[in-house]
Amino acid sequence: MKIKVVVHTADEGGYWAEVPGIPGCATQGEMFEELLQNLYEAIEGCLAIR
């Protein structure tokens, strides 16, 4: 499954990302690798409650 993700740099450092196709699904991470891991968890959680 492919899901579009928009990644932003946070003003205070690190990154945050949102998933436009899943309203309310967003996460953050200090390092890009942490952001990716958090994204997998956030998407899984958002899809589980749909």
Image (tube, rainbow, N blue to C red):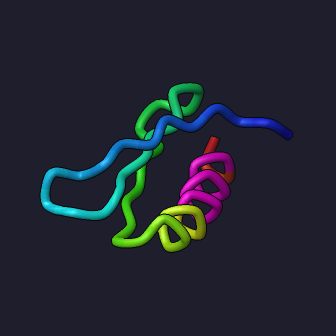
22 sits to left or right of 3: left
The image position of residue 10, as x and y in percent, is: 24, 52
Residue 25, compared with residue 41, is above or below; it is above
Residue 4, compared with residue 15, is above or below; it is above
Identify the residue at image location x=80%, y=36%: 2
47 sits to left or right of 26: right
Residue range of the region highlighted in magenta in the rendering? 39-47
Foreground: 15 or 47?
15
Residue 2, compared with residue 14, is above or below; it is above
The image position of residue 9, as x and y in percent, is: 31, 48
The image position of residue 12, as x and y in percent, is: 13, 60
Q: Give the main secondary structure, helix, strand or loop, of the magenta stretch.
A: helix
Identify the residue at image location x=49%, y=35%: 6
Look at the image and tell me in which quarter the C terminus lies.
top right
Image quadrant where residue 36 sits: bottom right
Look at the image and tell me in which quarter the N terminus lies.
top right
Residue lying at the far left of the rendered structure: 12
Residue lying at the far right of the rendered structure: 1
21 sits to left or right of 26: right
Identify the residue at image location x=59%, y=69%: 37
Q: Is residue 34 magenta?
A: no
